[in-house]
């Protein structure tokens, strides 16, 4: 039975990680660092969505956090609270969708060459 070479790798592989694994690990660390920077930047980027012809405006970050909800006074009708609720819900959902699309675009530029399946949380 043959043992490991002195450098920790398989015999005949030069002693290091086999098959360029060291290089791959270095690339993966760089990718992880870039992804962390991108996630931090996404927390500062904003998307805006409106509903009801601009009566309700929602601002969200690229990290899917709601930063602001603005409701015009004329949108408030005590006799029709359900309409206002629907407008707020629509604007929030649109803001979240825009935020997710922004995050996928930014992260996709980093991971696009890796052939990862969609929906891995990026």
Image: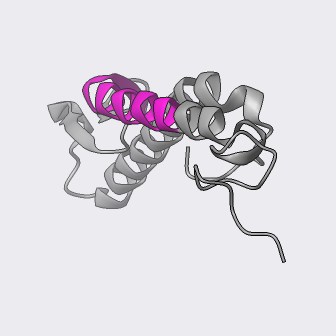
Residue at the extreme bottom of the image, as rendered: 1
Which segment is the magenta one?
A: 29-52
Is 10 situated left or right of 56 in this image? right
- Residue in the foreground of this view, choosing between 96 and 51: 96
Vertical relation: 78 (above or below) 55: below
Q: Residue at x 80, y 38 (%)?
A: 115
* 39 to the left or right of 109: left
**x, y percentage for residue 106?**
53, 24
Rendered-image quadrant of the C terminus? top right
Residue that extends furthest to the left in the rendered view of this protein: 73
Tell me which corner region of the image, top left, top right, bottom left or bottom right, holds residue 51: top left
For residue 49, above or below residue 25: above
Looking at the image, can residue 58 be seen? no
Picture coordinates of residue 53 (x, y %)?
Answer: 43, 25
Q: Is residue 49 left or right of residue 116?
A: left
From the top left corner, tell me how far across and down residue 116 is, in percent: 75, 44
Q: Could you tell me how many numbered marks the image carries?
A: 0
Is 33 magenta? The answer is yes
Residue drawn at 75 percent across, 55 percent down: 10
The correct choice, above or below, for 50 with respect to 2 in the image is above
Observer able to see residue 109? yes
Q: Residue at x 25, y 25 (%)?
A: 44
- Give the colour scheme of this rendering: one colour
Name the chief secondary structure element in magenta.
Answer: helix
Q: Nearer the viewer, residue 92 or 18?
A: 18
Left or right of 77, for residue 48: right
Residue 93 drawn at (x, y percent): 47, 47
Q: Is residue 34 one of those drawn in magenta?
A: yes
Placement of 2 over or under 9, stated as above or below: below
Pick the residue in front: 9 or 84.
9
Of the 4 image quadrants, the one containing the N terminus is: bottom right
């Amino acid at each position: 039975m043959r043992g490991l070479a002195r450098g920790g790798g398989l015999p005949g592989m030069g002693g290091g990680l086999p098959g360029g694994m060291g290089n791959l690990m270095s690339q993966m660390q760089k990718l992880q660092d870039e992804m962390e920077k991108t996630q931090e930047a996404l927390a500062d980027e904003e998307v805006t969505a409106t509903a009801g012809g601009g009566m309700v405006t929602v601002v969200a970050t690229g990290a899917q956090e709601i930063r602001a909800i603005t409701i015009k006074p004329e949108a408030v009708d005590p006799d029709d609270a359900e309409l206002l609720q629907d407008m707020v819900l629509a604007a929030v959902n649109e803001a979240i969708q825009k935020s997710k699309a922004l995050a996928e675009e930014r992260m996709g530029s980093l991971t696009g060459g890796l052939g990862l399946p969609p929906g891995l949380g990026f």
